[in-house]
Image (cartoon, rainbow, N blue to C red):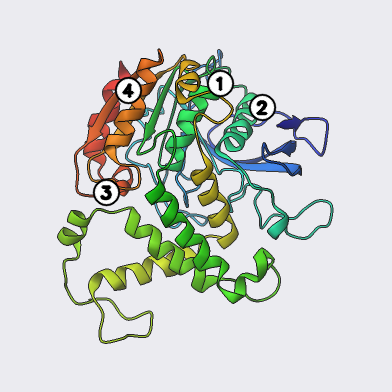
Amino acid sequence: MTLDPGAGAREAPAQVSPGRSHHRLGSFEPELGGFLQDVTIAYETWGELNAAGDNAVLVAHALTGDSHAAGEPDETYRKDGWWEPVIGPGHPIDTGEYFVICSNVLGGCSGSTGPASPDPASGKPYGSRFPIVTIRDIVRVQKRLLDDLGVKRLALVAGGSIGGQQALEWAVEFPGFVEKAIPVAANGALGPQGLGMSELGRRAIMDDPDWQGGDYYGTGRSPDRGLALARMAGMMTYQSAAGQWERFGRRPASRPALCEEFGGRFEIESYLHYQGQDLVGRFDANSYMYLLRAMDLYDVAAGYESPEEAYARIRARVLFVGITSDWLFPAREVRAAAETAKRAGADASYAEVDTLSGHDAFLKDWDELEAAIRPFIES
């Protein structure tokens, strides 16, 4: 991996007052190959960085998230920040105490360099020429951003799902830089059931004729049907069977139809149709595929002899948070990761959120999440 500050245009040190911004980092070589001439990262901040540069908190977003982790809707974002109840004055991540940063990840489509971004060499979108990126790539790019922001040490890094993978990788990759880490609904490697569901989503996009091998930008056609199907499949992995009975049951659909009916519709079907359409309106299909692949490829042991060797690098205090009804990253596997890290010598602990909400609990069950993470943050 290379981040070359001398290659490509480079901005002056970024402004660290609260707000929304973009920062150019120079060139980057992903660990699996390829080259990005000029990487831009979109980010938002809340609170103020102290003179020592050591009160920073990095919040890492999930698969289709963005840098808008907190704050009210505005002309850019039509909803509150995705972790609004967690970040702010008096919240678990208190912006009166911490300088909070959330960046849109490398490969995303909300202001950071991704497949839809123009390649400086041609002026055309990267499309299929965008290199495969990994969680380690994402974290290394975030580190460069923090360096440019003047952050000397992270008091905390936290996130859920693919954001939880980033939090864990931060603790392994930069052990002297991180004081505390909270991977939520994530562990050291996604299991085969999750990998299989990811492939269903990718195949839905790639089998859409409008995907055009990933080079659909500017053609007037995009793989909307494939992306919607991928999102529908994904949504089924984010919830539990018991939670779906409670929320949907077998009730007939109450919303207007978005798709052609075949013998009527159930409420769960209608919900999936709406979720698919919503993502098509705000997310790029290629970014979905690239980030899904990054989640699949993540293995904390990559480059080490074993997971234990990787975990032995950790110097931060780490709280793994499992969700009882999560079957994408089952709680037993999250707990096992915590136990492996602890055996390897890391200061690792485990907390559990007991809920029927499934994997998505870290984005909706606020009281339960706060109960799990606030004592760790304040200890």
Circle 4 packing at 10 Å, graded few (<14), some (14-19), many (20+), is some
Judge left or right: residue 146 versus residue 272.
right
> How far apart are labels 3 and 4 at the CA level?
22 Å
Nearest to N terminus: mark 1 or mark 3: 1
Label 3–label 2 contact, CB within 8 A: no
SS assignment at label 2: helix
* Residue type highlighted by circle 3: Gly
Q: Determine which residue is flagged by label 2.
A: 148
* Residue type highlighted by circle 4: Glu
> How far apart are labels 2 and 4 at the CA level?
35 Å
Q: Determine which residue is flagged by label 1.
A: 174
> How far apart are labels 3 and 2 at the CA level?
37 Å
On the image, which quarter does residue 370 sit in? Answer: top left
In this view, 73 is above or below 155: below
Residue occupying the point 32% across, 29% down: 336
Q: Nearer the viewer, residue 354 or 294?
A: 294
Q: Quadrant of the C terminus?
A: top left
Q: Quadrant of the N terminus?
A: top right
Q: Determine which residue is flagged by label 3.
A: 358
Nearest to N terminus: mark 3 or mark 4: 4
* Residue type highlighted by circle 1: Phe
Q: Determine which residue is flagged by label 4.
A: 339
Residue sitting at the far front: 305
* Residue type highlighted by circle 2: Asp
Given this view, does label 3 or label 4 mark the residue nearer the observer?
4
Residue occupying the point 65% across, 64% down: 214
Circle 3 packing at 10 Å, graded few (<14), some (14-19), many (20+), is many
Given this view, does label 2 or label 1 mark the residue nearer the observer?
1
Q: Position of residue 52 (x, y in %)?
A: 55, 12
